[in-house]
Amino acid sequence: MTLPEQLESVEVLEDWLSRPVPAAIEALAESRGDVIVLGAGGKIGPTLTRMIKRAAPERRVIAVSRFSDDSLPEQLRGHGIEVIVGDLLDEGFVATLPDCPNVIYLAGMKFGASEDLPLTWAMNTYLPTIVCKRFRESRIVALSSGNVYGLSSVYDYGSHESDTLQPVGEYANSCLGRERMFEYFSKLHDIPTAIIRLNYANELRYGVLLDLAKQVLAGDAIDISMGYVNVIWQGDANAMIVAAMTQVTCPPKPINVAGMGRLKIIDLCQEIAAIAGVEPCFRGREACDALLSDARGAWMDFGEPTIDLSTLLRWVVLWVQSGGPTLGKPTKFENRHGSF
């Protein structure tokens, strides 16, 4: 696959984010029936939903969300996706959703979580109970977060799916609560489920690399106390989430989805600076632990990421330099106390 030097528009970016790879195509061929994506209006949902439709154009694909972006429903319909607008916390609304053998659950709250903790817990722990009761006859792939692990040594691969969970902060604890609800109902109703522990997906409008690039190009001093990260191209994360439809089990199987290996923040900033022709500056001191996930199991099952780090860094820097739009949602990856 020949990769372009840069992605010059939102349309081109979203085309690349929604390109299906073999693992996603094979999973849809194996997982028969329609697909409903709950929480499809967030940063992941639109391109993931498009990827499913592109991989299986004959399949009915349904996107469900409140859709705070009023233009998004029409865009999705233009790609052949059925759209249903409503509040997933409304049990009456969820009861009206069509039966569907395959459910991809993306709903949750992270941004602003510390400003509205009751809503954070409702979204992340109560909503799964509503969904599991409604879709007890379905297969479910549920998005979670690598934050459930807490911090791990920077001298190892990162947290493994079998590690003890030690979440830091209320957001991470609510994510663990979400997982426990899916586990409970999976056992209660024999719902085949996979839980995706995602660590730092990146595209050009959002992600750790965007946060770092903006700081480097602005001449800001970068905090290196969270000295290492995992990053993965959002399109590759989309494909792995779809591919997890073949990995559902009862009780649920947790799957780490993250980039290949741990990346040093100083090295990333120096690479960004070299592309941009500037000098980075830093503050703080690297800690001996960081939020890191070992995703070798997912790479073995679904294939390695298709977009390499150098390409992604170049795309991000050129996007920032050209004034490309962003989602305005800093990852706050450097936060070591779990407040988002």
Image (spheres, rainbow, N blue to C red):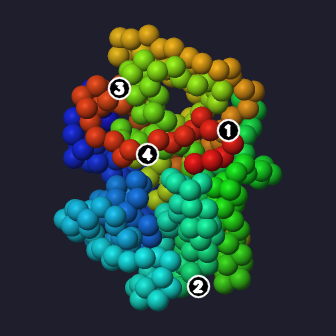
Viewer-nearest of discs 1 and 2: 1
How crowded pointer 2 is (Cα within 10 Å; few <14, some 14-19, many 20+) is rated as some
As drawn, is 334 to the left or to the right of 242?
Answer: right
Disc 2, SS: helix
First in residue order: circle 1 vs circle 4: 4
List x then y, in percent, for residue 240.
Answer: 49, 52
Image quadrant assignment for residue 80 = bottom left
As drawn, is 14 to the left or to the right of 106?
Answer: left
Viewer-nearest of discs 4 and 2: 4
Query: Which mark, by number, is residue 317?
Result: 3
**Any part of residue 187 in sight:** yes
Q: Which residue was labeled with disc 2? A: 133
As drawn, is 38 to the left or to the right of 266?
Answer: left
The one nearer the camera, 144 or 15, is 144
Q: Which residue is drawn at 45% across and 33% down?
A: 211
- Locate the N terminus by quadrant: top left
Q: Are marks 4 and 2 in contact (CB under 8 Å)?
A: no
| Spatial CA span between label 4 and label 2 | 32 Å
How crowded pointer 4 is (Cα within 10 Å; few <14, some 14-19, many 20+) is rated as few
| Spatial CA span between label 3 and label 2 | 45 Å
